[in-house]
């Protein structure tokens, strides 16, 4: 029991950051590369990479390499307690429409 409470506490710490929560909201809509996340959040690539690393270590995102780009997607199938949180995150569809279709190509 303590082990799962420790894991839940660590996950909640990850979710307490606005940038990481926004990244999860974006990934809820679709798989994304770092450059697209940087564009939407209007910050630096190293900043976003640090947040993505924390989310990956925390088991909340997967990464897939395609050519020189790394794409990120949600990894929450084994975390049903997160589904309620993800369901109440605001839609990021309007922000995604602003992206250039050839950013990572």
Image (cartoon, rainbow, N blue to C red):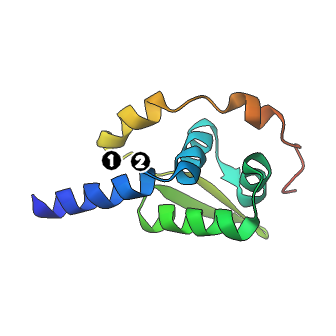
Q: Foreground residue, 25 or 16?
A: 16
Q: Is the N terminus in the top left, top right, bottom left or bottom right quadrant? A: bottom left
Q: What element carries label 2?
A: loop
Could you say where residue 17 lies in the image, as x and y percent from the top left? Answer: 49, 53
Q: Foreground residue, 61 or 12?
A: 12
Mark drawn on residue 21: none
Q: Is residue 58 left or right of residue 33?
A: left
Q: Is residue 64 left or right of residue 57?
A: right
In this rendering, is residue 82 above or below 56? above
Could you say where residue 48 lies in the image, as x and y percent from the top left? Answer: 66, 62
Could you say where residue 25 lies in the image, as x and y percent from the top left? Answer: 57, 40
Q: Is mark 1 on a helix, strand or loop?
A: loop
Q: Is the C terminus in the top left, top right, bottom left or bottom right quadrant? A: bottom right
Q: Is residue 50 left or right of residue 46?
A: left
Identify the residue position indicated by label 2 in the image: 76
Q: Foreground residue, 93 or 47?
A: 47
Q: Which residue is drawn at 70% across and 71% down?
A: 46
Figure quadrant of residue 34: bottom right
Tell me the crowding category of disc 1: few under 14, some 14 to 19, or many 20 or more residues within 10 angstroms, Cα based: few
Figure quadrant of residue 71: bottom right
Q: Residue at x 66, y 33 (%)?
A: 92
Tell me the crowding category of disc 2: few under 14, some 14 to 19, or many 20 or more residues within 10 angstroms, Cα based: some
In this rendering, is residue 49 above or below 13? below
Identify the residue position indicated by label 1 in the image: 79
Contact, mark 1 vs mark 2 (Cβ under 8 Å): yes
Q: Alpha carbon of mark 1 to alpha carbon of mark 2: how far?
A: 5 Å
Q: Which residue is drawn at 56% across and 39% down?
A: 28
Q: Which residue is drawn at 43% across and 51% down?
A: 16
């Amino acid at each position: 029991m303590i082990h799962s409470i420790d894991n839940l506490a660590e996950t909640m710490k990850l979710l307490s950051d606005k940038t990481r929560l926004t990244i999860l909201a974006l990934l809820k809509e679709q798989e994304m590369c770092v450059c697209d996340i940087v564009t939407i959040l209007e910050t630096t690539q190293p900043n976003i990479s640090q947040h993505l690393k924390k989310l990956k270590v925390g088991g909340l995102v997967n990464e897939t390499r395609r050519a020189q780009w790394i794409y990120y997607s949600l990894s929450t199938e084994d975390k049903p307690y997160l589904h309620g949180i993800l369901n109440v995150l605001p839609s990021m569809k309007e922000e995604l429409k602003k992206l250039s279709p050839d950013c990572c190509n």
